[in-house]
Amino acid sequence: MTIEASSIIPDGTTFVAPTGGTAVAISLLGAASGGKVTAKYDTEYDFLTRTLFDFSVKDPVQLDSAPGGYTQARETVVIKRPITLTNGNRTVNTITITVSRDPETSAADLKAFRLEAGTILGASSMDDFFLSHDLR
């Protein structure tokens, strides 16, 4: 499948629902500080193998040259998953999701935008892009 032929749902999506698997809660590792907090899966205890979630926010600031007089707000989550390679070496795979939005964006528009992104991340038609670095 190619990017051009991918099936993305840009509007009307009400929920992105993964199937299968087991739902696991996440818990915070310490308190939020400086607009950042880290979390992990409740079921992962080993420091070297646990998946980490780094959440951060950046508030808009006044900037006269920006549309509406303010910069965009940003919410970011970085998911870090350690893996062991077939040669025994360890590495960390990472997914970074950043939402940059105007402070006046409605809750409904923001939700629709996030759901559109979810269809891109989960669509099997995007496997070639994510697995093979294929931009066709």
Image (spheres, grey):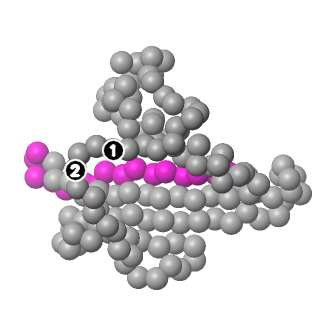
Residue 133 is at least partly visible in this image: no
Does 40 sit above or below residue 107? below
Q: Which residues are magenta?
A: 86-101
Give the Cα separation between the discs numbered 1 and 2.
8 Å
Residue at 43% x, 65% y: name it.
Answer: 54
SS under mark 1: loop
- Badge 2 is on which residue? 21
Disc 2 residue type (three-letter): Gly
From the viewer's perspective, tell me whether residue 6 is left or right of residue 65: left
From the viewer's perspective, tell me whether residue 108 is left or right of residue 8: right
Disc 1 residue type (three-letter): Pro
Say which quarter of the image contains residue 123: top left
Magenta region's main secondary structure? strand
Instruction: Say which of 17 and 128 sits in front.
Output: 17
Most distant residue in the bottom direction: 31
- Circles 1 and 2, Cβ within 8 Å, touching? The answer is yes
Q: Residues within 10 Å of mark 1 (few under 14, many from 20)?
A: few
Residue 87 magenta-drawn?
yes
- Badge 1 is on which residue? 18
Does 87 sit above or below residue 73? above
SS under mark 2: loop
Residue at 47% x, 73% y: name it.
Answer: 37
User: x, y (%) of residue 131?
Assistant: 31, 32
Any mark on residue 106, and which? none
User: x, y (%) of residue 101?
Assistant: 68, 51
